[in-house]
Image: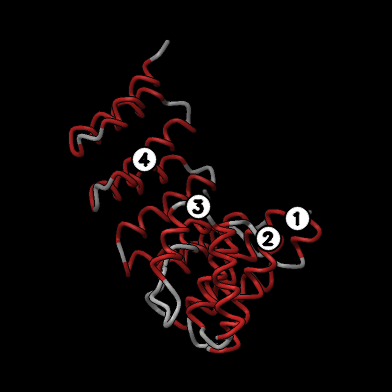
Amino acid sequence: MPRILFLLFFPILTIAQVDSKKIQDLLVQEKFFEAEEVLNTYLKQHPNDMEAVELLGDTYGHQKKWDEAMNSYQTLIEFDGKNANYHYKFGGVLGMKALSVSKIRALTLIDDLEEAFLKAAKLDPKHIDARWALVEYYMKLPGFLGGGVSSALPYAEELEKLSKVDGYLAKGFIYENDNEPELAEKYYKLAITEGGSLVCYDKLTKFYIAQDEPEKAILNLKAAYERHQDADLLIQIKALEKP
């Protein structure tokens, strides 16, 4: 699941008068349609409950109902245009919608998508996810439309000020996609030195595999296992050691 999609749909908040635990249980069980029905029924009686509207948008997102999710997040923005997370979620859903339609149709969405992420970043100077979204967006956007390293790197720099690990990972992502493997490796290694999480090791492992360097990937996985003792790492090592 793309990072943007993964991050969009998990902040489940307590909702007045609605059984939030029931909704949480339904989402954990992936009973998204049932959750949608419960929330829609509730909102017919309580249309101004913005927490319920947000949760409904998240529920639509789980089902890839991008238009319905966009409508929910637009309602939130109309209610509170200064909420950075509402703009971030709206931009994320626009991004997922753009991936599901033709390239020509997608072009009609990118201005609103970019504006939503930029608004989220401006409203909240510490919004890490919005800055990650902008890094990914600009690296995927063609250069003639304003994409590329020069557009993405400033947000990686902002990320580094907020979280060195995120900044290093973002720069690794940028340089990997810009075909600068030495710089990408450098920043992925810096992320491991700074944070050392399984996510950091995984980014470097996947980079080595993409570069067709299985030996380096194995060494990195072994270092990760020595630190984290995660059995899944041994499975990955075995898979790469196969002739």
Q: Which mark is residue 202?
A: 4
As measured in the structure, the alpha-carbon distance from the residue carrying label 1 to the one carrying label 2 is 7 Å
Q: Secondary structure at mark 4?
A: helix
At x 69% / y 59%, what residue is drawn?
Answer: 98
At x 55% / y 69%, what residue is drawn?
Answer: 38
As measured in the structure, the alpha-carbon distance from the residue carrying label 2 to the one carrying label 3 is 21 Å
**Toward the viewer: 71 or 222?**
71
Q: Secondary structure at mark 3?
A: loop
Tag 4 or tag 2, which sits nearer the N-term? 2
Q: Which mark is residue 101?
A: 1
As measured in the structure, the alpha-carbon distance from the residue carrying label 4 to the one carrying label 1 is 31 Å
Colour treatment of the image: secondary structure
**Toward the viewer: 37 or 9?**
37
Q: Nearer the viewer, mark 1 or mark 3?
A: 3
**Amino acid beneath label 2:** Lys
Q: Nearer the viewer, mark 3 or mark 4?
A: 3
As measured in the structure, the alpha-carbon distance from the residue carrying label 3 to the one carrying label 4 is 26 Å
**Amino acid beneath label 4:** Asp
In percent of width and height, residue 121 lies at 48, 76
Residue designated by label 3? 30
Please say if the residues under marks 1 and 2 sit with CB atoms less than 8 Å apart: yes
In percent of width and height, residue 49 lies at 51, 85
Label 4 Cα crowd, 10 Å radius (few <14 / some 14-19 / many 20+):
some
Please say if the residues under marks 1 and 3 sit with CB atoms less than 8 Å apart: no
At x 39% / y 43%, what residue is drawn?
Answer: 203
Tag 1 or tag 4, which sits nearer the N-term? 1
